[in-house]
Image (tube, rainbow, N blue to C red):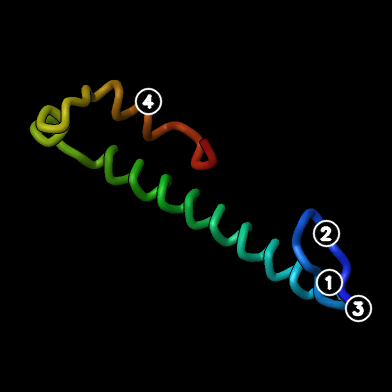
Amino acid sequence: MATRLWGRAEIVGGVSWVLWAARVAGRCLCRCHRRWRQRVHLSDLDARALRDIGVTRADAIRESRRAFWR
């Protein structure tokens, strides 16, 4: 017997709800990790590379200090 939960069919025992929640959490973690990695790379760029992409050193430092979830 399947029930409805927020418009999604839920398998008996809540298995599909758990899988959906795990997938959403996994996507969020991947996004956070990608942001963190990009900010680390940005902070490692030299002055010439920053000038090439039109970013000042102060902007790069400010961006690299932001929390990974933002």
Height in image: 26 above or below 43?
below
Q: Which residue position holds label 2? A: 5
Marks 1/2: CA–CA distance: 10 Å
Q: Earlier in the sequence, mark 1 or mark 2?
A: 2
In this picture, residue 8 sits left or right of residue 46: right
Q: Which residue position holds label 4? A: 62
Callout 3: 10 Å neighbours few (<14), some, many (20+)? few
Residue 62 percent across, percent down from the top left: 37, 25
The amino acid type, in three-letter code, at marker 2 is Leu
The amino acid type, in three-letter code, at marker 3 is Met
* Quadrant including the N terminus: bottom right
Q: Earlier in the sequence, mark 1 or mark 3?
A: 3
Q: Which residue position holds label 1? A: 14
Kindly indicate whether the residue at mark 2 contacts the one at mark 3 (C-beta within 8 angstroms). Answer: no
Q: Earlier in the sequence, mark 3 or mark 4?
A: 3
Q: Earlier in the sequence, mark 4 or mark 2?
A: 2
Discs 1/3, front = 3
Marks 1/3: CA–CA distance: 11 Å
In this picture, residue 42 sits left or right of residue 70: left
Q: Nearer the viewer, residue 4 or 66?
A: 4
Where residue 35 sits, quadrant-wise, is: top left
Residue 21 percent across, percent down from the top left: 70, 61
Q: Which residue position holds label 3? A: 1
Where residue 9 sits, quadrant-wise, is: bottom right
Q: Residue shown at 78%/75% (left/top)? A: 15
